[in-house]
Each structure stands twice: as structure tokens, then as C-alpha cells.
Image (cartoon, rainbow, N blue to C red):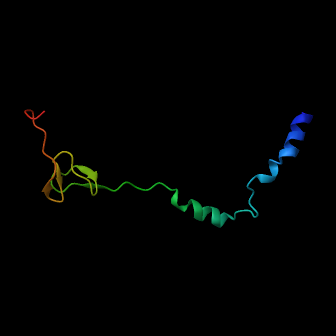
Amino acid sequence: MKIYLELILKTNIWGKMAVPKRKTSVSKRNMRRSHDSLKNINVILDKDSGEPRLSHKIDISTGMYKGRQVLKKKTEENN
């Protein structure tokens, strides 16, 4: 134990730790954490198919995006 304490005093590990000068106030802490909350997922009903999907994403069932055919529909012959 004595050797361990001498080693600590010689290397001065404790003097190099990052320690805040002041206590972080409740207001500052809460402002920092303001972006950590969970956001709601923006689910919309598709106009054509009526199925729920994420906004600004392709409708997987029909392959449509903004009124255009983006993906080809899978058929039994094209597998």
C-alpha cells in the first residue's frame, strides 16, 4: 500500500484530472439535454394505396414516390 501511495505522489496522476471549476447549473444542464428527447415518427397514410408509410420515403407495396413509378413491382415471373 505504501509503495502504491509513493507511486501516485511521484507521478502526480491526481493533479492532471479534468475537474470543472464551477457546478453546472440546472438550467445549463437542461439546455444541454434538450436535444436528447425522443421524436415522434412522421407516419402518413399513402394517398393511392391507403397504407401507412414514412413521409418522403418510397411506398414499398406500389413502388411509387411523388406520383412516379420508381420501383418495379415484383411478380411471380420476375422472381
Q: Which quadrant, please, contains the N terminus?
A: top right
Residue reaching furthest to the bottom = 27
Quadrant of res 21: bottom right
Q: Is residue 19 above or below residue 1?
A: below
Residue reaching furthest to the right = 2
Residue in the image at 13% along x and 39% along y: 74
Q: Which quadrant, please, contains the C terminus?
A: top left
Of residues 42 and 5, the one drawn nearer to the viewer in this rendering:
5
Percent from the top left, x then y, of residue 56?
Answer: 27, 57
Residue 11 as seen in the image, left or right of residue 50: right
Quadrant of res 33: bottom right
Of residues 53 and 71, the one drawn nearer to the viewer in this rendering:
71
Q: Is residue 68 above or below residue 1?
A: below
Residue in the image at 40% along x and 55% along y: 40
Residue 27 as seen in the image, left or right of residue 53: right
Quadrant of res 55: bottom left
Residue in the image at 9% along x and 33% along y: 76
Q: Is residue 52 above or below residue 25?
A: above
